[in-house]
Image (cartoon, rainbow, N blue to C red):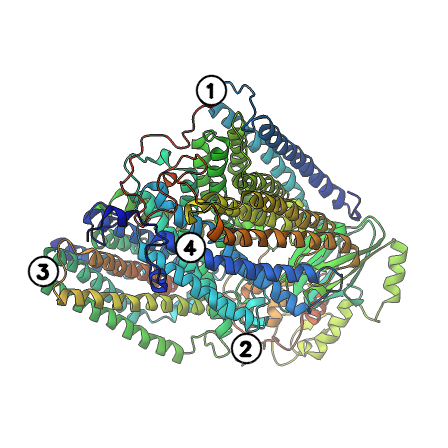
Amino acid sequence: MSLLPQASRMAPRIDWLIIGLLIISVAVLLLVFGLMLLYIVRYRHNSNIDRGKIAEKTWRLEIGWTAATLLCFLGLFVWGARLYAQLYRPPGNALIVYVVGKQWMWKVEYPGGQREINSLHVPVNRPVELLMTSEDVIHDFSVPAFRIKHDVLPGRYEMVWFTADRPGTYRLYCTQLCGVDHSAMTGWVTVMAPADYARWLAASRTGQTLAQQGQVLFMRFGCSGCHHAGLSGGGGTVRAPSLNGVFGSPVPLSDGSVVVADERYIRDSILQPKTQIVASYEPVMPSFKGQIDEADIVKLVAFIKSLAGDR
Amino acid sequence: MSEVTFQYENETHRADTAVAGFWLFLASEMLFFGGLFLVWTVYRQIHNSGFNQASQHANLLIGSINTVILFTSSAVFAAALPAGRRGANRTAFWLCVVTWLLGLAFLLLKLWEWKTDLGEGLFPGPDFSITGPGSAGAPLFWAFYFVATGLHGIHLLVGLGLVAWIALMAYRKQLSASNATSLEVVSLYWAFVDVIWLMLYPMIYLSGHVG
Amino acid sequence: MSITLEEARESYLTEEGTLRSWLLTTDHKRIALLYLGSTTVFFFLGGIAAAAMRLQLVTPNGLIVSNETYNRLFTGHGVIMVWFFLVPVVPVTLGNFVVPLMIGARDLAFPRLNLFSWYLFVLGGLIAIYALFAGGVDTGWTFYTPLSTDYAKGHVVAIVLGIFISGFSSIATGINFIVTIHRLRAPGLTWYRLPIFLWSLYATSVIYVLATPVLAITLVLLAFERIFRVGVFDPALGGDPLLFQHMFWFYSHPAVYIMILPGMGVVSEIIPAFSGKRLFGYHFVAWCSVAIAVIGFLVWGHHMFVAGTSVYSAIVFSILSYFVAVPSAIKVFNWLGTMHKGFVRFDAPMLYALGFIGLFTMGGLTGLFLAALAADVHLTQTYFVVAHFHYIMVGGMVSAFFGGLHYWWPKITGRMYPEMWGRVAAIMIFFGFNLTFFPQFILGYEGMPRRYATYPPQFQVLNVLSSAGATILAVAYLLPLGYLMWSLFRGARAPANPWNATGLEWQTPSPPPHINFIVTPVVTQPPYNYPPPEAQEHV
Amino acid sequence: MMRIALAWIVLLLLFLAELLMARGRIGPYAPLVGLAMIAVVVTCFMRLQKGSPLMHVFALAGLFWLCLLVGLGSVDFLTRTDHAVGQELAQPGQAQP
């Protein structure tokens, strides 16, 4: 299995599963082709071999191979399912990178404010969690060298994570048909040693972190006119909830329910503010749908996230 | 060897086979509407309050009147079958006429209801009128509403054609004990359209009034 | 209406010759030939699209067409091959012809419905062809929303309408077969005396009748959303595009079994006939068909392991997917068991059947890779998947179709096909097929995504190999078209039972008369009642 | 004829019950009454119980596969731990105050 580099912690484990499947397949294939060739040669119609009597009762054999097949399949199922569950359980300390799919490019944004298109830089031996969404149709983020793949859907955040363990550059693809230039929606993942990664981050800095860029947008879109955030904002004529410490905490809503303010909730509240009103506030916030793209929403989310510790 | 019983032993064998085949067709139809039921079930699960709000905007009065009209029409048409089998063509004819008129009344009321729905801005889109807290998912309900009632309406329209055909047979005195298969099949179809409505009625008109 | 014995013996082909008598016929045998003609047209249309795709992929940057045209090519290829060839082909051609013959009936239960379903099929097909030629569709045959509803250009509504209409043709055929098998069996023909082909067509028909309507409603919802720009899958309204995928695969996964069960049925006829031995484990094979049809409804979620469904549902669908593989494996062992101690002859139908076993086994085994959750994450949406389902559908089903066509050709036409050419074509198909699709497994493992008009240069060698195989495959598929046509006029006259096979269809003349059987047969024997080896050895 | 008239009266009563129940606290059970009405139509107007076993098989198959579609079709949505962003969105372009 040296055709494709194994560049993540998960890769060899998934390759072992594939090798296991391959061994079983080759064994069954040899059995089927072997018996087929044996029988058609040995029992060809003009062969005078003594055929004896044919078995009348077949159910023992039938039960036998049914049970054997079933057992073998159950083993494979458990093996595959355990690995799969790990693929979707990210460790808590992962580095978060935002990925936005758009016909036909990948936009990548880092917490430090770095941005790139069709390219992703990650440090080696450190778990990286990608929070992904799409501006239009369904895309799919796939890096074969890491053995990961996940659909990127409009209207929600999907997650995939990996720990790259071999520096180098690897191809990334969109693997869900997304329109005319689907096959051009590809790029490169660069895995770097920690020191190189730090240098790259510093060199690609745009001056502001993602949260700082979000703060600029927070002013520009007029959010700060109503919402208190950080040390500024609020104090206008309209009463709106303070955003300090909101992220990750439970929010009571006007219909009596309680939601935890996660990325999804923040995004919802920007685009469709009227559907989830915080208890005791008026539904006066206008929708920003159509005025703000997913890449900017990511910045606002990062900004509000950065206030999680403030009270 | 008559043309109709070519591959059958006799007329009864043919009639039973036709009716059984029609039941299989109805099973297929059930899955057709089943897709809509799945849509409703899933979205009601996800957008509970939006679906309740949206359902409260449905016209309960017309919906209820239509329900009564439709099960009354199935009862009337069910009575036409024994009449047809007896050869009582005149009775069968008038029962068909009543069924047909009830079906027509249902459709006219439905069209009127659609008109008021559209007037109230209930078609999903830029002018959709259900907004405010907890309304997420309401447009999905109304998209479901228009597709479901539309498809049901088309089925009813086909039913009207079939009932008219049976009425014509009765008018020409063609129904008899040995020639009632078409009547039986159409009565199954008409009752099935009723069954679908009895499923849709609580989903559309009652679900929002619960509790 | 009384007819003389002489008139009753007149073949269904020569009984009446006018065009009108063909287009308004209710004879299942003539309708089968109408279907054979129309599905052949679709097969070659889809084949031309495939050939263009393989040509495009000879170079990494694409040899002949733009990205947009390439997308239209694979969409057209998928739509035509799935809905207008693979799903209908064996039931409506071979099935239509032999079902009444196998059960000793004069026709299907609803002959006029049968003709009507052919017209629906042709109408749906013409609309689909119009959509493809009037500008095409580039959504893939899976029509995932919101690409198909809000973003794609092209005639999505038209092609969806074509598929919708042809769906009703499937439903009509399914109802006809199920009711016929229940109600029109000859005296003495109990369920366990039915040939396996009928069991598998029955199972197929269950899927036709109960899955196709779900596709129909899904396509209605899709068209509604495309026309009105609002609908139940629209994420902007709070809709979930994954619901579309669930509903689509509720049909389209069982449809995979529509595309393989009839092939398994054909092979279960051919192998006993050319092994001169009764089918091994008849009851198991029969019930496995039913089991595949029923369990096949429970596994659709395995198309969505990376789509964003819940992990729990992925695990449920994974284990169910393994369950559906068990009955398929049982069938393979039973076919091998049938050849054991038989008298194996190598006529063309048998070569096709042996090819089917080999290719289907490979397709089935690679399916295990895709059912194993973590392996699926790596392999899905790549050429591995493309190769996997082509092994099942083309390697399996198309081989079985050709096998069945050769097997029943003497019965259908009254002429023998040229045996040598039949064998050459069967062997060429097997090797051409492997050369085309085996490299695609490796491409998929290496990560080449499917539906790519252009690709990174490291994949070129394997792609060129695959295209070379496709050339052989194309020739191999054209061969039967030539020699079968030739045999219609020059082939040797076929006897009633050229293969010494059991089954009622071989007890009536080739080609059969309009009424199939002059005297309604009475069945007194189990199926595949070939004499035991000790009785045959000294013949 | 009597049987059909009786069935119609039962349907009417069930319908009124369904309507009243939907207004009250036992509302969630109102659809059960709807199912009872369907049972009346199927038995009295479609005469299923008088049909051949084959018809029973076909009707039950339809019902079974319907349950399968709705049941297995909801599994994913009932077990989503990570509810989608878009799932709590209202319609686009709502009027601004």
Residue A115 coordinates in the image, percent (x, y) = 79, 67
- Using the image as rendered, state which of residue B197 and residue D88 is in the foreground: B197
The residue indicated by pointer 1 is C534
Residue C180 coordinates in the image, percent (x, y) = 32, 47
For the residue marked with disc 4, what is the amino acid? Leu
The residue indicated by pointer 2 is D93
For the residue marked with disc 3, what is the amino acid? Ala
| Visible residue check, residue C457 | yes
- Using the image as rendered, state which of residue C326 and residue D18 is in the foreground: C326
Query: At numbered mark 4, what does the secondary structure look like: helix, strand or loop?
Result: helix
For the residue marked with disc 2, what is the amino acid? Gly
Q: Is residue C336 above or below residue A55?
A: below
Query: At numbered mark 2, what does the secondary structure look like: helix, strand or loop?
Result: loop
User: Do discs 2 and 3 belong to a common subunit?
Assistant: no
| Closer to viewer: mark 2 or mark 3 | 3
- Using the image as rendered, state which of residue C289 and residue D94 is in the foreground: C289
Task: Check if mark 2's residue and mark 1's residue have beta carbons within 8 Å.
Answer: no
Name the side, left or right, on which D63 lies relative to D87: left
The residue indicated by pointer 4 is C33
Task: Check if mark 3's residue and mark 4's residue have beta carbons within 8 Å.
Answer: no
| Visible residue check, residue A180 | no
Q: For the residues marked 4 and 2, what is the alpha-carbon distance in whole angstroms?
A: 56 Å
User: Do discs 4 and 1 belong to a common subunit?
Assistant: yes
Question: Chain under label 4?
Answer: C
| Closer to viewer: mark 2 or mark 1 | 1
The residue indicated by pointer 3 is B88
| Closer to viewer: mark 4 or mark 2 | 4
For the residue marked with disc 1, what is the amino acid? Glu
